[in-house]
Amino acid sequence: MATAESGACVVARDVARGHISAEEVLTEHLRRIRAWEPKVKAFIRVMEGDALGAARAVDAKRGRGEKLGRLAGVPIAVKDNILVRGVETTCASRILQGHLASYDATVTQRLLAEDAVIIGKTNMDEFAMGSSTENSSCHATRNPWDTACVPGGSSGGSAAAVAAGLCALALGSDTGGSIRQPAAFCGVAGLKPSYGRVSRHGLVAYASSLDQVGPLARSVADAALALSVIAGSDPMDSTCAAQPVPDYLKELEAGVKGLRIGIPKEYFLPGLDPEVETAVRAAVEVLTGLGAEVRDISLPHTRYAVSSYYIVAPCEASSNLARFDGIRYGRHSPQARDLGEAYELARGEGFGPEVKRRIMLGTYALSSGYYEAYYATAQRARALIKADFAAAFQQVDLIATPTAPTAAFRLGEKTEDPVAMYLSDVFTIPSNMAGNASMSVPCGLTRSGLPIGLQLIADCFCENSLLRAAAAYECARPFPMLPEAPRA
Amino acid sequence: MPISADEVRKIAKLARLRLGEDEVALYQAQFSRILELMSELSRLEAAELPIPQAPAANVLRDDSPHPFPEPERLLALAPERAGPYYKVKKVLP
């Protein structure tokens, strides 16, 4: 019978069969939240009352003999940059404190239509800008594997909540690695769908050409189930592709045999932690043993990914975040004398340091006289990165790399040096720049007991290959789950 | 690439951000570091590369209005309002 250790697939099946009620499932998770949350602080808001109402509604639906959805009674945590109608959505920013979402994001609607139970809003780096969840105006989240360490970011709350079993599944968003890097740090599966696979309607925009919503889960099957639910075209997002959505769960059965996996030499350079390298190479060996064919490849323009990303993303952010003007919603300054001052005060007081840094970087790079040197050059670099992947996917079906160059670092270790923080996304950024699909799955622990992530990258709209390889690996090398309560 | 405090103030003004003097000093130092990271791109012989044109297809939909179901939900978010209108500070100082 389903417990808080079970994932989404088992919970949905058992709730649909009546082996356990949605309310019992929720109660189990709330019990774990009470044990873990004081130490981990994964949530900005636990929606206990709303979740109880939703769980009871699912149970009543079953009682009436109605068919239940694919996520029946599954407690899901949602990152705080995804709108849930009537619930405070702050993006962990002071500027949106008290902001009640006036509609549901498309992904939220799709979860609810499948009878999911939204259990809370998770902590994040403010406006998804960061790699450690320390840039939250609420509080820092801690890694449940070692609370002296960060959970990664920006979807650190979602990753920590899934890892500690505070929810069966979570949604995050990934602009430069914000699902995969925290998934790696917290020992869970995290999938960044291809650009255009999932609707962004109701996701608070950071960098619109890079952002994607995706699942974090304790098993590959759960991630596949969640993707099957949230993927697919949406009239409210014109960048969301009309590609049909396969049943990703069924695809898992195909296994890894016959898939060609490329190992790019540019991802195995000095600076990569030796323990991470050993674990990732061992994982590739496992995949080989399962019938994958491995070959060396090259992605020669990888070196330009971080620098071009930190131009493109801030440029888009400077434009997207111009909407926070303190007029229609959000923080405002009553003492302002005129409109210009009202903008400057609301934004100066409302945004945190990393958000201001990126807005200003973008403003600078787009300003007259600098546009060609920065933005236009970055777009050219982006095209080269994209072309690298296109060439590689002529030879291979998947690319395997480390998700991050190290395991989780300690709180405060990189907060003073933005560049050191930016470099923790060095292996995840290229997928966003190219728009392809990628995923992190846990592939072992360091000697100090911190999870390590294996990143798999597939061509656009080839999530099925990712999931097949990840599921085969997971089956061969199951990853442990954390206990019911933190060790004293 | 070093950047001056005045440049930081000018960028902040363009970005509509009021900064304290301590913030100006902090961003001045950090920007120089970050722009150094960007200089990696100067290795690209950029001018010789064309700016890529994405194989874009227009996504169009009918121009039919869908009224927001509960406009009061939106208006209620405004810090200052007058009836069904948003209240805005005077535009000219």
Image (tube, rainbow, N blue to C red):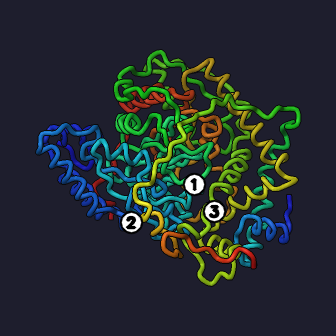
Cα gap from disc 3 to disc 2, whole angstroms: 26 Å
Q: Is residue A252 above or below residue A427?
A: above
- Of circles 1 and 3, the one toward us is 3
Q: In percent of the image, x 20 and y 44: which residue is there?
A: A2
What kind of residue is marked 2? Lys
**Residue A280 visible in the picture:** no
Neighbourhood count class around disc 2 (C-alpha, 10 Å): few under 14, some 14–19, many 20 upward: some
Q: In percent of the image, x 29 and y 47: which residue is there?
A: A116
Instruction: Report whether mark 2 lies on the same chain as mark 1.
Output: yes
Mark 3: secondary structure: helix
Q: Earlier in the sequence, mark 2 or mark 1?
A: 2
What kind of residue is marked 1? Ser
Q: Is residue A277 above or below residue A73?
A: above
Which residue in the structure is indicated by mark 2? A39
Q: Name which quarter of the figure residue A413 lies in.
A: bottom right
Front residue of B23/A341: it is A341
Which residue in the structure is indicated by mark 1? A131
Front residue of A90/A2: it is A90
Q: In percent of the image, x 70 and y 70: which residue is there?
A: B17
Q: Output the chain of dot 3.
A: A
Residue B6 shown left or right of residue A360 in the figure: right
Q: Earlier in the sequence, mark 3 or mark 2?
A: 2
Q: In percent of the image, x 54 and y 59: which residue is there?
A: A125
Which residue in the structure is indicated by mark 3? A355
Residue A470 rendering spot, x and y as whole percentages: 44, 31
Mark 2: secondary structure: helix
| The C terminus of chain A, quarter of image | bottom left
**Residue A413 visible in the picture:** yes
